[in-house]
Image (spheres, grey):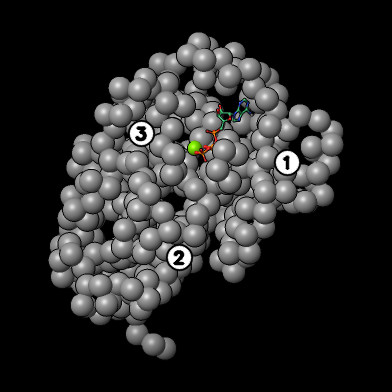
Amino acid sequence: MKIAFVGKGGSGKTTLSSLFIRHLADRRLPVVAVDADINQHLGAALGLDDEEAAALPAMGAHLPLIKEYLRGSNPRIASVDTMIKTTPPGEGSRLLRLQEDNPVYDACARTVTLDGNAIRLLATGPFTESDLGVACYHSKTGAVELCLNHLVDGREEFMVVDMTAGSDSFASGMFTRFDMTFLVAEPTRKGVSVYRQYKEYARDFGVSLKVVGNKVQSEDDLDFLRDEVGDDLLVTVGHSDWVRAMEKGRARPFAELEEPNSRALRTLHEAADAAYEQRDWERYTRQMVHFHLRNAESWANARTGADLAAQVDPSFVLSEDLQAGVPQPARPTPQPA
Ligand SMILES: Nc1ncnc2c1ncn2[C@@H]1O[C@H](COP(=O)(O)OP(=O)(O)OP(=O)(O)O)[C@@H](O)[C@H]1O
Ligand SMILES: [Mg+2]
């Protein structure tokens, strides 16, 4: 299952991602955690010290390796240079699984142990001033998007992505790549304005979006969120002393998280589970093709000097029944009836 945490800067995306990851790890479920946020803090929220967090490999720096691996022997992708973040998989491509060893994880992932349970952590690498609001080809999250588009994940295994609700994720189509998107909102006008913008983009693509209220302190806060987001409000989280203790460097075992917050995490887990029934791999594949064609036309054809529409394999549909790690076999091209 692919789960995103998005929201305004400072709303608590990283905090809630890290708590959800701890919750899943506590249930011994396989997790690949991905830090794709502008401020790379997920490692620290998962208990890494400054030195360990700084030593995390940057996916952005391994983009050529990631592309080379995923491209496999796909004849529609002439070279790694013409592979962009939206290039979809097809015949000859290699796919990824959450639970496997592969060169991408070898290069980019680090194992983090949470109360005795190991998970994998990936990070895009720090964003610089020049990454913000720049053209798509510089996108730091391109490596994550490629991985999402080549991932064949099943039930009860999770990729959890901590990311920014920035314009970049709308242009690329990244915002459509998840089974469930948790939008973290504080009970403020700015907090819910990001929700409205996201909802607007999400509507046309059938994105499953739920709001998680954070730092909700009073009945008035709750009323405000209910008024502003209605049925999209899934659950709220209050101030957590457990989180604050961790910020002070006095981390406590996950079992000591406040009960209302543990309950909120169970609600998130249930919502993520329920999203499995909504899965539609054909739609998922169609949307990645849609955004690829859009990116090809708007900048990538000019940038690469190739017609990137030709990268689309019309007979390919991503699905969890496909085998990862090996070049995908050819399929007969569907003939018009
Ligand atoms: N429920 C909570 N209880 C206590 N502290 C919280 C809670 N939620 C968030 N915080 C604190 O608020 C601050 C901002 O949270 P966090 O870093 O998770 O937000 P973010 O949305 O990831 O921010 P950024 O946009 O900077 O990445 C942190 O210091 C975090 O510890
Ligand atoms: Mg953050």
Q: Residues within 10 Å of mark 1 (few under 14, many from 20)?
A: many
Q: Are marks 2 and 3 in contact (CB under 8 Å)?
A: no
Q: Nearer the viewer, mark 3 or mark 1?
A: 1
Residue that label 2 marks: 171
Nearest the viewer among 111 and 117 is 111
Residue that label 1 marks: 187
Residue 59 horizontal side relative to residue 271, left or right: left
Quarter of the picture containing the C terminus is: bottom left
Nearest the viewer among 27 and 52 is 52
Residue 121 horizontal side relative to residue 195, left or right: left
Which of the 4 image quarters holds residue 186?
A: top right
- Marked residue nearer the N-terminal end (2 or 3): 3
> What amino acid is labelled 3 in the image?
Leu
Q: Position of residue 63 (x, y in %)?
A: 23, 51
Judging from the image, what secondary structure is the residue with disc 3 in? strand
Q: Is residue 111 above or below residue 155?
A: above
Judging from the image, what secondary structure is the residue with disc 2 in? helix
Q: Residues within 10 Å of mark 3 (few under 14, many from 20)?
A: many
Residue that label 3 marks: 121
Q: Is residue 331 above or below residue 189?
A: below
